[in-house]
Image (cartoon, grey):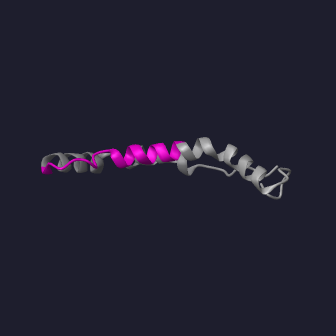
Amino acid sequence: MCAGEAGTVPAALTAYDRQRRRRSQAVARASFRTGRFGQQLRHPAAVALRDTLLRLTPARASLRAMARYADWQPPTAP
């Protein structure tokens, strides 16, 4: 972005932020939701149930859920 037509470093950073903000916020929200899933559980039975459900989740389903974040191409410079 700095080598492009933005002109100044602040303008280049603004353009870069505009291109990446929506995706980076979506990744942050997904991370928050994933981290929140069952992390507050304290009862051993509830923890065991959560762990069992995660273990039984098919690998394909987990990979499909992550694919939208892993399958990413950086923006092209102007």
The span shown in magenta is: 26-44
Judge left or right: residue 38 versus residue 3: left
Is residue 31 covered in magenta? yes
Name the residue located 72 percent from the left edge and 52 percent from the top edge. 13
Is residue 17 covered in magenta? no
Q: Nearer the viewer, residue 55 or 26?
A: 26
Q: Is residue 68 visible?
A: no
Residue 12 x %, y %:
77, 52
Residue 54 x %, y %:
29, 48
Q: How many numbered marks, from 0 up? A: 0
Name the main secondary structure of what is drawn in magenta.
helix
Name the residue located 51 percent from the left edge and 46 percent from the top edge. 27
Q: Nearer the viewer, residue 10 or 1?
A: 10
Residue 56 x %, y %:
28, 47
Judge left or right: residue 64 versus residue 77: left
Q: Quadrant of the N terminus?
A: bottom right
Name the residue located 19 percent from the left edge and 46 percent from the top edge. 49
Q: Is residue 22 visible?
A: yes
Name the residue located 24 percent from the left edge and 46 percent from the top edge. 50
